[in-house]
Amino acid sequence: MAIGLSAIFFSAIAGLLVASNQSTGSLYNAQTAYWRAQEGISALKSMSFSELSATWDGRATYSGVSDQWTLGTGQVEFPDGQTRSLAIIEVQRDENCEIVEIGGDVDPDSYYLRSNMAWEGLGGSKQDLVLQSLRVNWSDPVGQCFNPTDAGGISLDWSGGYWGGSKQLRGVYIINNTDRDITITKMTLHWDVPASFLQQIFAIGTKVWSDSGPGSPYGQQPSGTEIDVLDATIPAGYTDETHKIQFTQAMTGATLIMEFEFGDGSVLITDPFTP
């Protein structure tokens, strides 16, 4: 009886060991597949956006000579029987630039990068793993969804700002950091001297608004009024002094916030500052 029980016991142990080894092997295969799928995504991410195309479907091969990945055709077959195929897939976006599955327009600045692993599991079962990542052409977009805004290309330097005659804001500079012309279309100024009203705004070497024209609204304006200024274009790479923004009362010690709206509708709002 003892011998029989021992046989049963050791048979059970052997079965558990086999099952454990099979489970460990399955886990190892899955982990290996995941790592290889990630490697495929990383290979596609290492390439410039211009090298990618949704018409390509195949493999990426690493060259130790050039120290980079190159695109090829077909799939990669690994010694343990796993295979990897890569794909670059078009992305559709709606009018709000949100990603949609159908009914949108193909975004020239976005691709899905897909890495598909396949291998044979226990008992010949087919196993697969798919990883996907979104790639966006941030550096040089050609579509409308990722074009840099006008506001993003403008900065203000008020570190040298001062009050000329106590009523005229001077020494504030607006800087176009881009390689394109940018147009100011509206301005809104906020200040903390309630008795003082806005009287004139000069920019880019000309009067763009005053209480008697040009621009609107007509008349002296209180803090927070949106001013539709005469369009003023800041040339590419140009730094311009605002020249003069005039108020009706002394503004020494006042704190201001300036808002600029540009031709593309984007808005730049400064932090509060005291000239």
Image: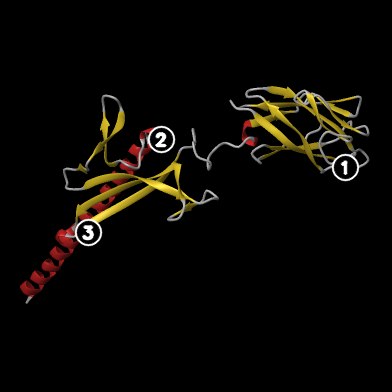
Residue 90 sits above or below residue 270 on the image: below
Q: Amino acid at mark 3?
A: Ser
> Taking the image as drawn, is residue 254 in sight?
yes
Q: Secondary structure at mark 1?
A: loop
Q: Which mark is residue 130?
A: none
- Quarter-wise, where is residue 214 in the image? top right
Please, what secondary structure does the residue beneath circle 2 have?
helix
Q: Image check: 129 left or right of 158?
A: left
Q: CA distance from mark 1 to mark 3?
A: 75 Å
* Residue at 17%, 48% in the rendered image: 81
Q: Residue furthest bottom?
A: 1
**Residue 79 image position (x, y, % from top left):** 16, 43
Residue 270 in the image: x percent, y percent? 72, 36
Residue placed under numbered mark 3 in the picture = 23
Mark 2 vs 3, N-terminal side: 3
Quarter containing the N terminus: bottom left
**Residue 48 visible:** no
- Kind of residue sitting beneath label 1: Pro
* Quarter in which the C terminus is drawn: top right
Name the residue carrying label 2.
Answer: 49
Residue 149, how many percent across, how many down?
60, 37
Q: Residues within 10 Å of mark 2 (few under 14, many from 20)?
A: some
User: Which residue, given by chain and number where applicable, does mark 1 sit on?
Assistant: 222
Q: Please report whichever mark, 2 or 1, sits nearer to the chain's N-terminal start.
A: 2
Cβ atoms at labels 2 and 3 below 8 Å apart: no
Q: How crowded is the residue under tag 3: few (<14 C-alpha within 10 Å), some, or many (20+)?
A: few
Q: Mark 2 or 3, which is nearer the eye?
A: 2
Q: Residue at x 8, y 70 (%)?
A: 7
* Amino acid at circle 2: Phe
SS of the residue at dot 3? helix
**Can you give x and y, in whole percent of width and height, for residue 259 in the image?**
74, 38
